Amino acid sequence: MPRTVDTQKIWDLIKNEHTAVLVTVGTDGSLDSRPMGCVQKEFDGTLWFLTFKDSPKILEIAENQHALVSYARPSDYEFISISGRARIVDDRDQVHALWSEGFRVWFPNGLESPNIALVALNVEVAKAWTKPASSLTLHTTTYGPASPGSLPLRRKLLNRKPYAPSLMSALGQKTFCQKRI
């Protein structure tokens, strides 16, 4: 049974970000990454991005839905990695809800631009490293149902002995779920 997650904790870490890196699996099986503008106004377990309908990422997502979005704030020692399954959405109402006039740089015709597509990432796992000493810890939050292939690995990770609570307190870590890395 999947754990229930407080999406607010993830939102608190990403809500002020302007750019993220979206990683997809290329059509040749290699990883492909690119910066993406953050358009979130709230977070309910799905990340949204505007893109072009003729972008290579559209084909990549059509062939393999596995994707990762990464955020970094090195000056604050905060790093967030969110993975899940991406999908292309053709929903003009959602485009309108996410739209900001700043997007006219890419879409000069605004909301009427025929080449606007949406990428939705249904979040399955979110990891955050949030202090200078965080290389010792990994925080993981799981969303939604696990894919069948990931269950043995999750069970193995969840059965690992976590770091001692006194060490975690000394590091000042905010944890979702502790796991030794």
Image (cartoon, helix red, strand yellow):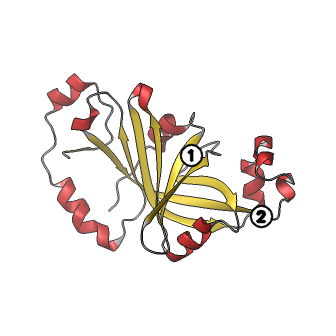
In the rendered image, the vertical position of residue 91 relative to residue 133, given as above or below: below
Q: Amino acid at mark 2?
A: Asn
In the rendered image, residue 181, in percent from the top left (x then y), is placed at 20, 47
Task: Tell me the residue at 15%/27% (across/down).
Answer: 166
Task: Tell me the residue at 21%/61% (across/down).
Answer: 155
Q: Does dot 2 land on a helix, a strand or a loop?
A: loop
Mark 2 closeness class: few <14, some 14–19, many ≥20 residues within 10 Å: some
Q: Quadrant of residue 2?
A: bottom left
Left-right relation of 146 to 102: left
Mark 1 closeness class: few <14, some 14–19, many ≥20 residues within 10 Å: some
Mark 1 vs mark 2, foreground winner is 2
Distance between mark 1 and mark 2 Cα atoms: 25 Å
In the rendered image, residue 125, in percent from the top left (x then y), is placed at 39, 54
Marker disc for residue 43: 1
Left-right relation of 60 to 74: right
Pick whichever, 11 or 181, lies toward us: 181
Task: Tell me the residue at 56%/36% (across/down).
Answer: 17
Left-right relation of 65 to 90: left
Pick whichever, 162 or 17, lies toward us: 17
In the rendered image, the vertical position of residue 174 relative to residue 69, given as above or below: above
Q: Does dot 1 land on a helix, a strand or a loop?
A: loop
The numbered mark, 1 or 2, whose residue comes first in the sequence reads 1
Q: Amino acid at mark 1?
A: Phe
In the rendered image, residue 165, in percent from the top left (x then y), is placed at 17, 32
Q: Mark 2 — residue?
A: 115
